[in-house]
Amino acid sequence: MSEPRSGNVEVGGISWLARMIDKARLEAAGEIDEYDLEFPCPLDTRLLKQLGVEAKVFQNIAVSSTTDEQILFELERVGANLPEKPLR
């Protein structure tokens, strides 16, 4: 996998979500240490709390989904608090 996307990249109008997706996948693959990162970090934890989703649930969704759109669909399916307006 390549380096995680920037925290400024939005998915579904949510800043940081793209980076958190990439980090969750790296963690599951055992490759996160190559980038000197952690999942969940404090910013991940803050976003997960806003979404109302546990880190392990999010990671399972990120790993089992192939696209960002599918991740948004799965987050909605599990009852995540997806905003109508972007979270910042």
Image (tube, grey):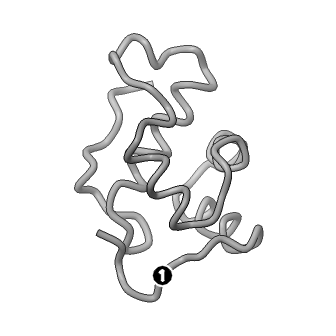
Looking at the picture, does residue 25 appear above or below residue 1? below
Q: Would you name the residue on which mark 1 appears?
A: 83
Residue at 33% x, 28% y is 3
The quadrant in which the N terminus is found is: top left
At a point 70% along the width and 64% down the height, the residue shown is 74
Above/below status of 87 relative to 84: above
Q: Position of residue 61 (x, y in %)?
A: 69, 50
Q: Of 27 and 5, which appears nearest the observer?
A: 27
Quarter location, residue 30: top right
Q: Tell me if 11 is positioned left or right of 80 in this view.
A: left
At horizontal 46% and vertical 58% (from top left) the residue drawn is: 47
Q: How many numbered marks, from 0 up?
A: 1
Label 1: few (<14), some or many (≥20) within 10 Å? Answer: few
Q: Quadrant of residue 37?
A: top left
User: What amino acid type should be assigned to the residue bearing mark 1?
Assistant: Pro
Q: Is residue 54 above or below residue 76?
A: above
Looking at the image, residue 57 sits to the left or right of residue 70; the answer is right
